[in-house]
Amino acid sequence: MGGYRLRTACSRTLAALLAACVFAAGAQSGAGDVVFVPTPQVVVERMLEMARVSRSDFVIDLGSGDGRVVITAAKKHGARGLGVDLDPGLVERAGKNAEREGVTERAQFFRRNMFETDVSRATVVTMYLLPNLNVRLRPKLLRELKPGARVVSHDYHMDDWLPDASATLKVPEKTVGTRGVSYVYLWIVPANVGGLWQLKITGPEGELSAELAIVQAFQKIDGVLKTGARSRQFSAARLRGERIGFTVTDEGGALRRDFSGRVQRDTMGGEVRVSHDGRESVEHWEAVRLSRPWPFDQRR
Ligand SMILES: C[S@@+](CC[C@H](N)C(=O)[O-])C[C@H]1O[C@@H](n2cnc3c(N)ncnc32)[C@H](O)[C@@H]1O
């Protein structure tokens, strides 16, 4: 992630120059918080690939310009979607482009402020904005999008919400912002799992009750499993969308439980692979949230 941080620092400076650069480069229209600079088509395709866009997706492009992202998602990946832009001329142009490409049923464009756009139906959100706008959109994205939704940004990051994946592309024709190079960042919206949970493990030898205390910073999680006064730290804790996993060992390593499962708001559960003195078994676990961390987190 060292390279990411360096790029992040560079991109802050470059972003500050973006508005000036675009005028120098002869671009263009656009309205609101950032002018219109189109994402090069090769980068659009990489963004959609990284987000694994398919027929089942609904893509929203925030600040959609000439509509190329949503139109490509519809035409090449069979997705549905919409774009919003403050510039009425661009909204009209995007609509005409969709018509020309034969995707008006699946790609629609509206004159709307992205900060006032409900993104809750999106399974994929795309953006080519500026770092400060990404960060301003961040609480909205985390609040409205469902766990597992993907957010893809061209060139700019989300500050301390680190990406789940990133790519660097050589784009010789790119003369704006980071010249000749594009960065693509992908985030998977994590379920909200922070707080105290009541855990029940059911296996052939009966039931075990315990508590889980989980701390969360975006997709990074850690926690402990507590029985009475004893606490055992998680290892290999992971969260990807609504899929959670962690390992707890006991008896000096002789007993190991690998949890994997799915989070649904205030309940979660799945499978525990138990390894005890060389014997393997599979048990079932479920947990109910008793409390969320303070201050109360309003996310789903
Ligand atoms: C850099 S362009 C990106 C265009 C397109 N997404 C792409 O990747 O090719 C950003 C666009 O955001 C639009 N925009 C700026 N502020 C906006 C806002 N608050 N709400 C909606 N659109 C906005 C601009 O008019 C511009 O078309």
Image (tube, rainbow, N blue to C red):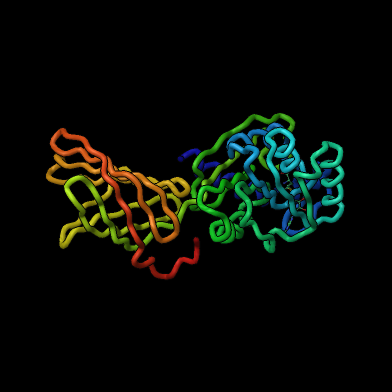
Occupied quadrant, residue 288: bottom left
The single residue placed furthest to the bottom in the displayed view is 295
Q: For this view, does 250 lie left or right of residue 214?
A: left
Find residue 228 and report its horizontal and vertical position in percent.
Answer: 16, 62
Residue drawn at point x = 21 percent, y = 35 percent: 280
Occupied quadrant, residue 47: top right
Q: Is residue 273 above or below residue 132?
A: above
Residue drawn at point x = 38 percent, y = 66 percent: 293
Q: Is residue 287 visible?
A: yes
Residue sitting nearer the eye, 237 or 207:
207
Find residue 164 and report its horizontal and vertical position in percent.
Answer: 49, 42
Q: For this view, does 93 lie left or right of residue 35?
A: right
Q: Is residue 139 above or below residue 100?
A: below
Residue drawn at point x = 55 percent, y = 46 percent: 8
Residue drawn at point x = 66 percent, y = 46 percent: 59
Q: How many marks?
A: 0
Occupied quadrant, residue 110: bottom right
Find residue 37 and report its horizontal and vertical position in percent.
Answer: 76, 45
Q: Is residue 175 visible?
A: no
Q: Is residue 100 above or below residue 231?
A: above
Residue sitting nearer the eye, 175 or 104:
104
Find residue 86 and report its horizontal and vertical position in percent.
Answer: 78, 58
Q: Is residue 167 above or below residue 89?
A: above
Q: For this view, does 50 lie left or right of residue 34?
A: left
